[in-house]
Image: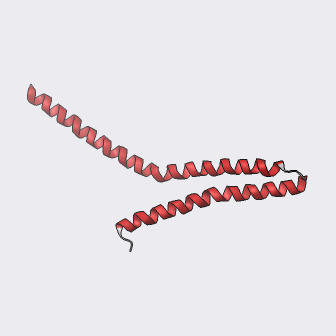
Amino acid sequence: MLKKENKGIAKAFIMILQIGLTMLAPLLVCGWIGLWLDEKLDTTLGFLIMMLLGVLAAFRNFFQLVRGFYEKDLKRENAKQEYFDNLKRQGEKKQDRQKK
């Protein structure tokens, strides 16, 4: 079993690995398709266009992946903030009642 601090390290390592693979896959596929198109059509423009599409796809995948990782943390953080805001409001109401 992993210790609690090691789980955080493992999770971060897995996230970095997944981000790398998620960004590398569209670049390799689009680059290969671009080279194939250049060979078939005897041009050099196909590779550049496909690599641009690969870069755009890689960054799109990156942002979706990172948002997914941090969405849970953001929900948990918002729930805690709402809890503390409710406690603060209840305390203020209690003080208002005591003043009257």
* Front position in the image: 62 or 83: 62
Percent x, y for residue 84? 26, 42
Residue 28 in the figure: left or right of residue 81: right
Determine whether 4 is above or below 57 in the image: below
On the rendered image, what quadrant is the C terminus found in? top left
Residue 37 in the figure: left or right of residue 13: right
Determine whether 12 is above or below 95 in the image: below
State the count of labels. Answer: 0
Residue 37 in the figure: left or right of residue 15: right
Residue in the image at 68% along x and 55% along y: 26
* Front position in the image: 60 or 38: 38
Percent x, y for residue 87? 22, 40
On the rendered image, what quadrant is the N terminus found in? bottom left
Residue in the image at 9% along x and 30% along y: 98
* Front position in the image: 60 or 99: 60
Residue in the image at 17% along x and 31% along y: 93
Residue in the image at 23% along x and 34% along y: 89
The single residue placed furthest to the bottom in the displayed view is 1
| Location of residue 91 by image quarter | top left
Percent x, y for residue 75? 40, 47
| Location of residue 9 by image quarter | bottom left
The color scheme shown is secondary structure
Percent x, y for residue 29? 73, 58
